Amino acid sequence: MKTNTMNASTATDSKLHEFFLDQLKDIYWAEKKLVKTLPKLEEAATSQELKDALRNHCEQTKQHVSRLENVFNMIGESADSTKCPAMAGIVDEGSDIIDETDDGSAQRDVGLIFAGQKAEHYEIATYGGLVQLAKTLGYNDAANLMSQTLAEEKQADALLTQIAEGSANRQAKREPQSSW
Ligand SMILES: [Fe+2]
């Protein structure tokens, strides 16, 4: 009886471990995609404030990638990624915004902030879940590491809100009608 219970528990843990691993691979792909994408958004952005925010977050994102590599290592798995269709879609939206707005416009920044915040919210949702699940599975070091990333994603999101409210939205409202 005791053995059966243990087997059942191990099977459940293993399924949960597999789910945890799938989500890790998803966010690993997403973070690596962002490392490539953020410099393009920085180049396209109009205001120095937004460019700085995107550059700083790109540096943080590189750290998020290496933290995830540590997490894979901590749980005895090799670092591997699977395409995250959600982040791929958000990145495509970012490209559309660049195509559809004028260079040097505040409207460009408003759009890029939207895309950036969508990316942050996706990451916040994923890391939030991963931190909780890591604790449940007893991966406490991994939970601590991902908590640091989660806090940085929340800060990045708050900074984008600040830029939108502080200047970008109002400046865009004053701009003449563009192609948007
Ligand atoms: Fe990140």
Image (spheres, rainbow, N blue to C red):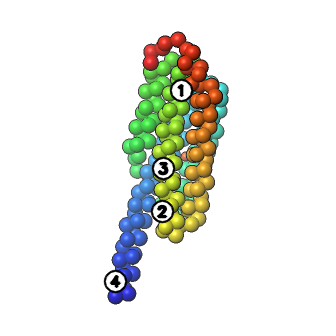
- Please report the residue visible at 48 percent of the width from the left and 68 percent of the height from the top: 137
Task: Work out whether mark 4 precedes mark 1 in sequence or the reverse, and give the earlier one.
Answer: 4
Where 82 falls versus 48 (above or below)?
below
- Please report the residue visible at 37 percent of the width from the left and 86 percent of the height from the top: 3
Task: Work out whether mark 4 precedes mark 2 in sequence or the reverse, and give the earlier one.
Answer: 4
SS type, badge 4: helix
Q: Amino acid at mark 1?
A: Val
SS type, badge 2: helix
Return the residue at label 1: 110
Q: Amino acid at mark 4?
A: Asn
Label 2 vs label 1: CA separation? Answer: 35 Å
Q: Amino acid at mark 2?
A: Leu
- 147, 99: nearer the viewer: 147
SS type, badge 3: helix
Label 4 vs label 3: CA separation? Answer: 35 Å
Return the residue at label 3: 125
Residue 124: x %, y % from top left: 52, 48
- Please report the residue visible at 45 percent of the width from the left and 36 percent of the height from the top: 91
Return the residue at label 4: 4
Asked if disc 2 and disc 3 are in contact, CB closer than 8 Å, the reply is no
The image quadrant where one finds the N terminus is bottom left
Return the residue at label 2: 133
Q: Does the rendering let one see residue 40?
A: no
Label 4 vs label 1: CA separation? Answer: 57 Å
Label 4 vs label 2: CA separation? Answer: 24 Å
